Image (cartoon, grey):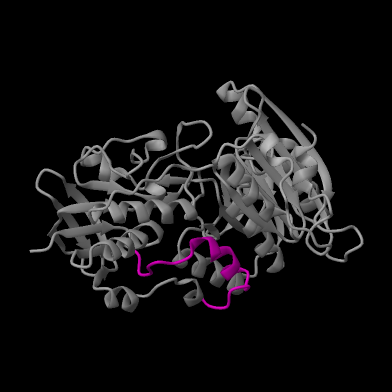
Amino acid sequence: MSEKLVIIGGVAAGTSAAAKARRVNPDLDITVYTDDEYISYAGCGLPYFIGGKIASRENLLARSLADFAAQNISVKTLMRAEEIKPENGKVIIQNLQNQLTFEDNYDRLVIATGARPFVPPLEGVELDGIFTLRTIHDSVRIKEYLFQHRPQKAAVIGAGYIGLEMVENLVEHGCQVTLIEKAPHIIPNMDADMSQILTQYLQSRGVEIRTGETITSFMGNKSVSGLSTDKGEIAADFVLLSIGVQPNSEIAAAAGIEPGINNAIRVNAKMETNKDRIYAAGDCATTSHLTSGKEVYIPMGTTANKQGKVAGENAAGGNASFSGVLGTGIARVMEMEISRTGLCESECQALGINYISRRIKSRTAAHYCPVSGEIHLKLIVNQNNNCLIGAQIVGFAGAAMRIDMLATAITVGTTVEDLIDMDLAYSPPFSPVWDPVLIALNQF
């Protein structure tokens, strides 16, 4: 009789685990339970569906129930895992359509329960017109609200990637947007001097930026009409909360599975938890930082897919491992692009790393080309070994993807000397004869 793999969660990590497990073991009995009605969708595309750049929610679906059925993978939607019983290899599942519960057995279990948006327990947070964005259902509700109510003043609380992308899409809906960030500057995982470039650009496009400001309550009767902060009041008839996520790890903790940083499920490089035959992956799990070596919680779609693949392979009898992350991220806000990888200066300082940084301003292409735009590039180097450990980019078309070259360099542990004579491609529409990366490296 074949072994049974049960996977809890059906978006990035869960479906990646299922697909990889099937490739590794064609005979494995695989069942996926998800409390969502949608599976295997591109959550990072949700702001663009709201803004109309993606015409249909169906375009966000990577794979369908039929696709998984064709691989002999059973996917059960609207089924929520309520309890894990590691001592006898069982999970308790609730059918969200009829509220009935039942038990299922497993030989191996992958927990891929993801994360949920953090909602502050503030007065008025339940008012109509206040949203979080995590699921396709969330995006549909937001899009319908924008078209039905035509809000004029939108407040986006939290200036990370999702918040910034929603600023662009709310502006395109005709909203006057205020971006509020508790940290001293927007994009808190970048350095202040780099984030200031984007701040000035957004202000030039009519976006009000308020940093170092904390929300204290929301105002309104049935619908939101504004919010209060520790610095005053802001009128808003639409509010997006984009202030981070919390791992859905409670079910694991209740089963005695060890938590790590941010209460995410602690896993090793093989995605194993402290409980035999139980794995975890994606936004509910920890990982390690390739530069600092520290346990971190950096929930990203890319990481979820990679961790899910490793968990699925190992749950099916393989021996894969996931080395960790650099926190590489990228976003576009209107015409401006941002990206980062590795450590920023504040992280180096917190870790006690002896570092040096250099920042340059250049062009994305030859200055005489119409596509040429401004690019600001910052590199951070460990002074003890001269290895590149961090990079940040802010600029226009063609700027941000250079971060992948730098993430590669950091991953393999290259020094400035190793990189300074890289034979990079050159053609005027793509780069100046001296690529901005080489210009920055030559500053050390």
Q: Position of residue 152 (x, y in %)?
A: 69, 63
Choose between 378 and 258: the one closer to the eye: 378
Choose between 312 and 145: the one closer to the eye: 312
On-image quarter of the C terminus: top right
Highlighted range, magenta:
36-56
Q: Position of residue 194 (x, y in %)?
A: 74, 41
Q: Is residue 415 rendered to the left or right of residue 397?
A: left
Residue 195 vs 381, above or below: the answer is below
Q: Position of residue 104 (x, y in %)?
A: 14, 59
Choose between 133 and 294: the one closer to the eye: 294
What's the residue at 30%, 55% (across, down)? 313
- Can see residue 389? yes
Quadrant position of residue 415: top right
Q: Position of residue 65 (x, y in %)?
A: 32, 75
What's the residue at 33%, 65% (across, down)? 19
By secondary structure, the bulk of the magenta-drawn segment is best described as loop
Choose between 223 and 138: the one closer to the eye: 138
Which residue reaches farthest right? 368
Was residue 408 drawn as part of the magenta stretch in this picture? no
- Can see residue 154? no
On-image quarter of the N terminus: bottom left
Was residue 47 drawn as part of the magenta stretch in this picture? yes
Q: Is residue 419 rendered to the left or right of residue 2?
A: right
